[in-house]
């Protein structure tokens, strides 16, 4: 299939040079990607309880959602988990990235690299390990345990994104700052941190989204506090689902559109050419 | 263990930090110490004064999803000015695992055999029935549940609902039903048959088909049950407890189903209710019940008692029967239910039969492990 | 992003020299994240390994021990079947994601023009909305009496297709959930690729097809490997897709592990399953790292 997408010319060609198959395929791909999204948005305005027959326009499921204390508390819990995880993992992950990029001794580098193992560990392993660790210590499962597990999972993601940015930055700038009399810490604060800011935004955005949507880790480590939204949705799907879920999905979609637009716009406002999105995609 | 803690405090965190590398020390901490913990807390709970029915915080609620009329919950919230913090489970085993992991809830709705298990493990509190204003609705009118098999004198639980497990099928798709558990092997509906994703229900169904005891732990019986369940797989669409949605989506033509869910489906979701039949197989059908309990480590046992009392109130009983489609075990419940289900004689639930041999019972750990292994191997095959 | 994943892993094998003046600061910076991972990751994985030699006690609680019983139990062919099934599902998911994802990354990277960023954003947005809700939407669409089957019946194309509760549905769910992680790294490596290479290839090879396989594919192998890692790993450990879209015979390792922890009440057996999963991945990673190192050398 891929073979037919071969262009006869390089990139940056004008519109007429586009291979029609590749474009059509991509359009179809995006269409299929959006089919369930359209269904979710459409049925969130359904006047009937049905999830397959559209009865007419209504906002009753939004009213249900905004009046459903259970759903709202789950939403708040997820927002709280994502925000705290994002902040903590950015701090720890950036430290790890800086250290990994600069540390010289082999034991320290091995330690740092071991810290990246969660990246290549399926979530279910991390989830099982976290569950056994917390219950083994007699810790009550709660939002705190979810957050600890999510941070453990997120640090390595932040580290690789930030590290990608660091490795493209030349050492000379920092050396120059040192020559001008900066302490290592000042050089870090005044030179390095501003440079990696887009990477931090990108990492923050990614972690927020991944953690907000994460189900497996949350499922294993959640306790008596309001369940994270993903866990609640899962148990509703397994049992009896309310169309209010579609309203929740539509709101989440709106927020993600907003966040992604921000990630495109904010770096530009800060006078940078590269958007945070480029950093997520590695571009 | 009994001290309720909502979130990790500094002590937990320090324990966490000191736990580094000392994994062996854990043996003393949470795991193998297990045998002493339950007995210790059960002594504590019988000695401690019983809880008083008064608001002492929000209600931490743990039950099936959507297993209570929202209007009943709303009424409780406005009457007592408390919030209901709701968490759901999708199976009793998962519920028990969460409670054994130390999660503290105020009210939980386990199935009867799990009530017995939790009582024996010291996980639930003894209830002072004088705290219930509506106690007369539930007890003392000659109800079987004044002294049910799983909890003598209902000391630790308040009975809630009851159901049979049978087979729901579509007449327009299935014309060869025999009124037997063999219908879950029906050729016409091959690929459209669902079996409940609960170990007791699946093993119990196979046992009844084979003419065995639903609670059997005999190795020969279990081997036969395993074979018969595996032989069923080509006929199945999936294992699922979501019977209502599977029937509503049109994916299920035959569904191993709970009586209450069937009534709920007929009343709220079915596009053509007349096409659907609920049959009780001639080999016998499981009949089970559940009951509300308050865990030993409940943070707000006062509010929890108020909740149990609230559910006994006749108005709320009526609302819940209408919403859920299950008979509730109060004085007025069975009649209200009989009226609601009058069009479907097979949905009748005879309270007096709750001691019959198709009630799921507890096993000693080795037997339970053998039954679990059968279920795991069936699912994995 | 993923391009840096293997960079970091490959780095272990390489020595990189740095001026030693700043070492102390970096060591200080390394301490907190390293300590965090030691406490919450390494030691918890250690517990899993230890418990895999334990058994279930009389009260139903897990007890540590030194027996191989759980591993012996796993030698039952039933478990082997589940492992093979999971591997097949995960490999199929990865292959399908690659075949579907490559043309999309290619089109956006080389023919996206000024809409490139917008297209990537458009691609990413669905993945930032709930995976579970999207899966649920699919399952209602593809139900026997769902919209798609209704359309098929109305147009007379088919009398109805059973999409759900099949191995295909589980794989489709996995592909749908993670294909973006295949597209993005390939997109990134196509972006980095020197387009003069393609021009040169055109002179050297006759057909565009030959050029594609001789020039473009090798130049983006790093991106593909990154994508493979990011799709394969989550797919291998997943239990949600099989739970929501699977049938009676689509159980994966993830389902088995989840069942031991939340239904079967046999945490030691669940731990042993987890350990076996980790070992399988270790073997996969060894091959994977060899492949990435080869790519790095070729660069």
Image (cartoon, coloured by chain):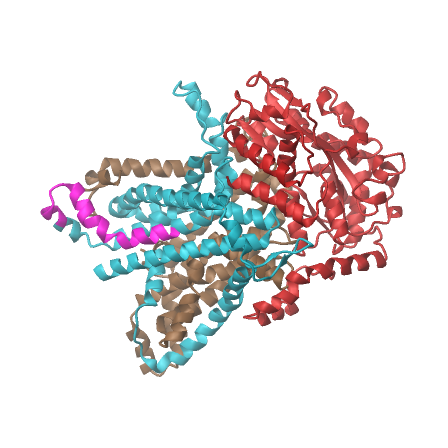
Chain colours: A brown, B red, C cyan
Q: How many marks?
A: 0
Residue B300 among those drawn in magenta: no
- The spot of residue B180 in percent (x, y) is 64, 23
Residue C212 among those drawn in magenta: yes
Q: Is residue A194 above or below residue B105?
A: below
Q: Is residue C266 above or below residue C13?
A: above
Position of C89 compared to C240: left or right?
left
Q: Quadrant of residue A198?
A: bottom left
- The spot of residue A181 in percent (x, y) is 35, 83
Given residues C161 and B44, the one toward you in this image is B44
Q: Residue furthest left?
A: C203
Query: Does any portion of residue C130 appear in the rendered image?
Result: no
Q: Is residue C213 above or below residue C44?
A: above
Given residues C168 and B272, the one toward you in this image is C168
Position of C27 compared to B353: left or right?
left
Position of A188 compared to A7: left or right?
right
Main SS of residues in magenta: helix
Residue drawn at x 32%, y 64% is C10
Residue drawn at x 50%, y 68% is C38
Residue drawn at x 16%, y 43% is C210
Q: Which part of the image, by quadrant, shows the N terminus of chain B?
A: bottom right
Q: Quadrant of residue B50?
A: bottom right
Residue drawn at x 79%, y 40% is B159
- In the image, the segment drawn in magenta is C201-230
Query: Does any portion of residue C242 appear in the rendered image?
Result: yes
- The spot of residue C67 in percent (x, y) is 56, 59
Q: Quadrant of residue C170?
A: top left
- The spot of residue C154 in percent (x, y) is 43, 19
């Amino acid at each position: 299939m891929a073979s037919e997408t071969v262009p006869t010319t390089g990139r940056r060609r004008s519109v007429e040079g586009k291979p029609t198959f590749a474009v059509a395929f991509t359009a179809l791909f995006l269409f299929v990607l959006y089919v369930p999204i359209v269904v979710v948005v459409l049925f969130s305005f359904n006047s009937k309880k049905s999830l397959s027959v559209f009865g007419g326009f209504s906002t009753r499921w939004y009213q249900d959602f905004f009046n459903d204390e259970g759903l709202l508390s789950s939403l708040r819990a997820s927002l709280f988990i994502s925000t705290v995880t994002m902040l903590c993992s950015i701090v720890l992950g950036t430290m790890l990235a800086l250290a990994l990029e600069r540390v010289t001794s082999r034991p320290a580098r091995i330690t740092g690299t071991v810290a990246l193992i969660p990246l290549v560990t399926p979530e279910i392993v991390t989830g099982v390990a976290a569950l056994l660790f917390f219950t083994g210590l007699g810790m009550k499962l709660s939002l705190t345990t979810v957050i600890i597990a999510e941070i453990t999972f997120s640090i390595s993601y932040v580290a690789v994104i930030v590290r990608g940015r660091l490795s493209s930055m030349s050492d000379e700038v920092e050396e120059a700052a040192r020559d001008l009399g900066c302490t290592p810490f000042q050089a870090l604060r005044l030179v390095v941190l501003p440079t990696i800011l887009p990477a931090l935004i990108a990492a923050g955005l990614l972690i927020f989204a991944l953690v907000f949507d994460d189900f497996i880790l949350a499922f294993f480590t959640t306790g008596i506090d309001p369940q994270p939204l993903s866990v609640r949705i899962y148990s509703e799907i397994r049992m009896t689902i309310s169309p209010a879920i579609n309203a929740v999905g539509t709101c989440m979609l709106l927020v993600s559109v907003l966040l992604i637009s921000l990630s495109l716009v904010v770096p530009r406002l800060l006078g940078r050419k590269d958007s945070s999105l480029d950093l997520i995609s590695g571009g | 263990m009994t001290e309720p803690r909502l979130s990790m405090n500094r002590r937990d965190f320090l324990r966490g930090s000191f736990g580094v590398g000392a994994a062996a020390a854990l043996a003393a901490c949470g795991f193998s110490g297990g045998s002493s913990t339950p007995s210790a807390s059960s002594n504590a709970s019988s000695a401690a004064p019983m809880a008083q029915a008064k608001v002492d915080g929000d209600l931490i609620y743990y039950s099936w999803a959507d297993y209570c009329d929202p209007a009943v919950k709303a009424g409780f919230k406005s009457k007592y000015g408390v919030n209901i913090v709701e968490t759901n489970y999708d199976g009793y085993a998962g519920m028990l695992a969460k409670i054994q992991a130390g999660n503290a809830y105020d009210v939980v709705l386990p199935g009867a055999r799990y009530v017995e298990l939790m009582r024996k493990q010291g996980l639930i509190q003894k209830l002072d029935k004088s705290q219930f204003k509506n106690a007369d609705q539930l007890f003392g009118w000659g109800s079987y549940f004044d002294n049910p098999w799983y909890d003598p004198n209902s000391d630790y639980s308040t009975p809630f609902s009851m159901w049979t497990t049978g087979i729901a099928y579509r007449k327009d798709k299935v014309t060869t039903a025999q009124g037997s558990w063999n219908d879950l092997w029906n050729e016409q509906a091959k690929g459209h048959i669902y079996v409940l994703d609960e170990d007791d229900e699946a093993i119990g169904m196979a046992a009844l088909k084979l003419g065995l005891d639903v609670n059997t732990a005999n190795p020969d019986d279990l081997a036969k049950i395993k074979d018969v369940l595996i032989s069923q797989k080509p006929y199945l669409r999936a294992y699922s407890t979501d019977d209502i949605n599977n029937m509503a989506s049109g994916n299920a033509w035959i569904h191993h189903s709970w009586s209450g869910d069937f009534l709920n489906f007929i009343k709220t979701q079915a596009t053509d209710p007349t096409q659907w039949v609920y049959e009780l197989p001639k080999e016998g059908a499981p009949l089970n019940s559940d009951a509300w309990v308050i865990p030993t480590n409940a943070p707000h046992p006062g509010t929890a008692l108020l909740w149990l009392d609230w559910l006994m109130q006749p108005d709320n009983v009526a609302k819940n029967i209408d919403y859920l489609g299950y008979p509730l075990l109060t004085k007025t419940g069975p009649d209200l239910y009989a009226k609601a289900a009058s069009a479907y004689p097979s949905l009748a639930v005879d309270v007096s039969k709750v001691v019959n041999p198709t009630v799921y019972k507890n096993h000693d750990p080795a037997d339970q492990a053998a039954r679990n292994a059968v279920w795991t191997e069936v699912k994995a095959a | 992003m993923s391009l840096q994943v293997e960079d970091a892993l490959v780095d272990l094998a390489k020595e990189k020299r740095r001026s030693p003046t700043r070492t102390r600061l970096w060591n200080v910076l390394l301490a907190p994240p390293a300590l965090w991972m030691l406490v919450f990751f390494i030691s918890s994985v250690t517990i899993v390994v230890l418990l895999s030699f334990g058994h279930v006690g009389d009260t139903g609680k897990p007890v540590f021990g030194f027996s191989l019983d759980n591993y012996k139990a796993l030698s039952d062919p039933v478990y082997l079947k589940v492992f093979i099934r999971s591997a097949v599902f995960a490999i199929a998911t990865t292959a399908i994601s690659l075949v579907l994802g490559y043309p999309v990354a290619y089109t956006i990277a080389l023919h996206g023009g000024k809409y490139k960023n917008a297209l990537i954003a458009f691609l990413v947005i669905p993945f930032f909305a709930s995976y579970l809700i999207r899966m649920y939407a699919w399952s209602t669409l593809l139900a026997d009496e769902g919209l798609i089957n209704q359309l098929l019946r109305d147009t007379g194309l088919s009398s109805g297709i059973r999409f759900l509760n099949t191995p295909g549905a589980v794989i489709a769910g996995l592909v749908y959930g993670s294909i973006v992680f295949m597209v993005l790294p390939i997109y990134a490596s196509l972006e980095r690729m020197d387009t003069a290479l393609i021009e040169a290839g055109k002179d050297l090879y006759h057909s565009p097809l030959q050029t594609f396989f001789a020039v473009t594919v090798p130049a983006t192998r790093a991106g593909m490997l990154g994508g493979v890692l990011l799709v394969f790993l989550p797919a291998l450990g997943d239990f949600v897709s099989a739970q929501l879209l699977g049938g009676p015979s689509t159980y994966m390792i993830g389902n088995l592990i989840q069942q031991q922890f939340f239904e079967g009440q046999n945490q030691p057996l669940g731990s042993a399953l987890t350990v076996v999963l980790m070992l399988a991945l270790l073997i996969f990673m060894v091959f994977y790292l060899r492949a990435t190192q080869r790519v790095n050398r070729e660069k």
